[in-house]
Image: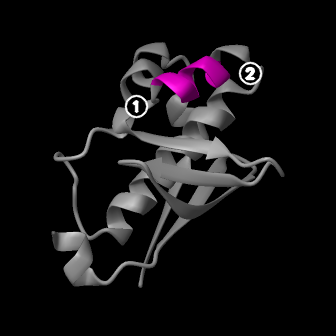
Amino acid sequence: MSIGIDIVYMPRFEHKETLAKRILSPAEFAIYEKRSDKVKFIAGRFAAKEAFLKAVRGGFGQIAFSHISILYDNLGVPYLEYEQKRYDVSISHDGEYAVAIAYVSASREDMEK
């Protein structure tokens, strides 16, 4: 089991359309384009993906953010999807900050395969 956490300063993501295209998966970008709270959306996604990479103990520079998706189940609860596997993730926003936590239940040995 492994947990990763990340916090980001949301104003850093203002007016970052090119960043959105680089870090969002195609499914996420389709959602992003319809949102009025674009900064909040992309900041939360960025924090969640960073948290996931911390939980899997690496992958920075090896796993493209656009290959990771944060989607919603039928109850509206977010989950992270990578290589057709689902992982638990929680995203929260307060003031000018977004924070996310990712939980990976695989053993460290399984993650290194």
Residue nearer the viewer, 49 or 19: 49
The amino acid type of the residue labelled 2 equals Arg
In which image quadrant can residue 42 be found? top right
In the image, 63: left or right of 95? left
Query: 104 above or below 43?
Result: below
What residue did someone put label 2 on?
A: 35
The residue to which callout 1 is attached is 23
Q: Residues within 10 Å of mark 2 (few under 14, many from 20)?
A: few
- Judge whether 37 appears above or below 64 on screen: above
Q: Amino acid at mark 1?
A: Ile
- The magenta span reads 26-32
Q: Is residue 64 left or right of residue 12?
A: left
Secondary element under disc 1, as helix, strand or loop, is helix
Residue beneath the point at 55% across and 21% down: 29
Q: What's the CA distance linking mark 2 and mark 1? A: 16 Å
On residue 3, the disc is: none
Locate the N terminus and report the quarter of the image it occupies: bottom left
**What residue appears at the point 80 percent right and 47 percent down from the top-left corner?**
74
Whether residue 17 appears in magenta in the rendering, the answer is no
Percent x, y for residue 45?
Answer: 54, 43
Q: Are marks 2 and 1 in contact (CB under 8 Å)?
A: no
Direction right: furthest residue: 75
